[in-house]
Image (tube, grey):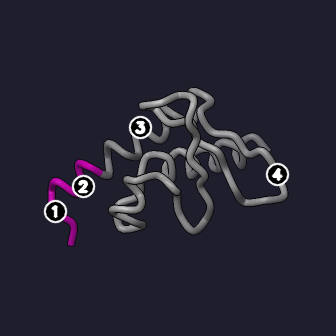
């Protein structure tokens, strides 16, 4: 069972991810690869790579899929938006 702090953390990550997707911070350079680039919020010149296996950011490396990072959540929302537009 998740603690209250984990739930709050996940809510922030989901909200941040949705905002990043809506702001255009997610791109899919090659539509044939399930690989996405997500702009870093702290350094807009840096991008993180997100795949179905995870994200290469430090936050994901620390917490993994149990508490996904905002980049991973941004890609999930980006995919949802693309499916809704198809």
The verdict on residue 77 being magenta is no
Whether label 1 touches label 4, CB < 8 Å: no
* Residue indicated by mark 1: 3
Residues under labels 1 and 4: Cα distance? 38 Å
Whether label 1 touches label 2, CB < 8 Å: yes
- Bounds of the magenta span? 1-9
Tell me which corner region of the image, top left, top right, bottom left or bottom right, holds residue 35: bottom right
Q: Position of residue 40 (x, y in %)?
A: 50, 36
Magenta: main secondary structure equals helix
* Residue indicated by mark 4: 31
Q: Secondary structure at mark 2?
A: helix
Residues under labels 3 and 1: Cα distance? 20 Å
Q: Position of residue 74 (x, y in %)?
A: 53, 44
Camera-side residue of 71 and 44: 44
For marks 1 and 4, the one nearer the N-term is: 1
The answer to whether 83 is drawn above or below residue 19 in the figure is below
Whether label 3 touches label 1, CB < 8 Å: no
* Residue indicated by mark 3: 16
Residue 3 located left or right of residue 7: left
Q: How many marks?
A: 4
């Amino acid at each position: 069972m998740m603690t209250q702090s984990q739930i709050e953390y996940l809510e922030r990550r989901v909200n941040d991810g949705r905002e990043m997707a809506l702001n255009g911070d997610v791109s899919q350079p090659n539509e044939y690869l399930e690989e996405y680039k997500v702009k870093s919020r702290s350094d807009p010149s840096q991008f993180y790579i997100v795949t179905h296996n995870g994200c290469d950011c430090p936050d994901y490396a620390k917490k993994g899929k149990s508490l996904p990072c905002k980049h991973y959540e941004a890609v999930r929302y980006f995919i949802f938006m693309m499916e809704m537009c198809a």
